[in-house]
Image (spheres, rainbow, N blue to C red):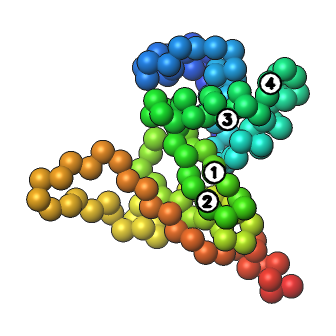
Amino acid sequence: MKKYSYTTQELLDKLSEYGVKPSAQRLLILRFLMENRIHPNVDEIYQALLPEQPTLSRTTVYNTLKLLSAAGIIRCIDVGGSHGARWDYSHDDHAHFLCTCCGSVTDVEFGEYVPAFPTPPGGYTVQSAEINLRGICPDCHKQMAS
């Protein structure tokens, strides 16, 4: 997995670009999502950041994710079932593979398993699209075979 690293100024610029007022918690959560492209859920983000920010609450994480999503900086991936919502920073065009067994979410590039993004007829302008493939990941297949 590619390693990402961002300066505080880059994070401030990103928030400013989308019209979001910065706060320590917003910078912390945005940095985590931008540097860890692992499609975490609210609790995973909370647990990862708690040692660095002991006063952080799950509610703050949830509210910040909703705010960043509404602004268009991140997007929510609905995994469904007991696995809950996952969060994705990536702005590259890609689909997601959702494992129905373990709940993992993996990026899938267009053209790899997903055909090129279609253009609808009749004058429609596509602003965004979500393609989620569901099935069983290789790790779960191995566990089932054991």
27 lies above or below 88: above
- Amino acid found under the numbered disc labelled 4: Leu
Name the element at disc 1.
Answer: strand
The residues bearing labels 1 and 3 have C-alpha atoms spaced at a distance of 11 Å
Residue for badge 4: 56
Query: Is there CB contact under 8 Å for labels 1 and 2?
Result: yes
| Marked residue nearer the N-terminal end (1 or 2) | 2
Which disc is residue 79 wearing? 2
| Marked residue nearer the N-terminal end (1 or 4) | 4
The residues bearing labels 3 and 4 have C-alpha atoms spaced at a distance of 11 Å
57 lies left or right of 92 = right
Residue 98, image x, y percentages: 61, 64
Which disc is residue 62 wearing? 3
127 lies above or below 136: above
47 lies above or below 102: above
Residue 140, image x, y percentages: 75, 74
Residue for badge 1: 85
Name the element at disc 2.
Answer: loop
Report the residue at 57% width, 20% height from top: 11
| Marked residue nearer the N-terminal end (3 or 4) | 4
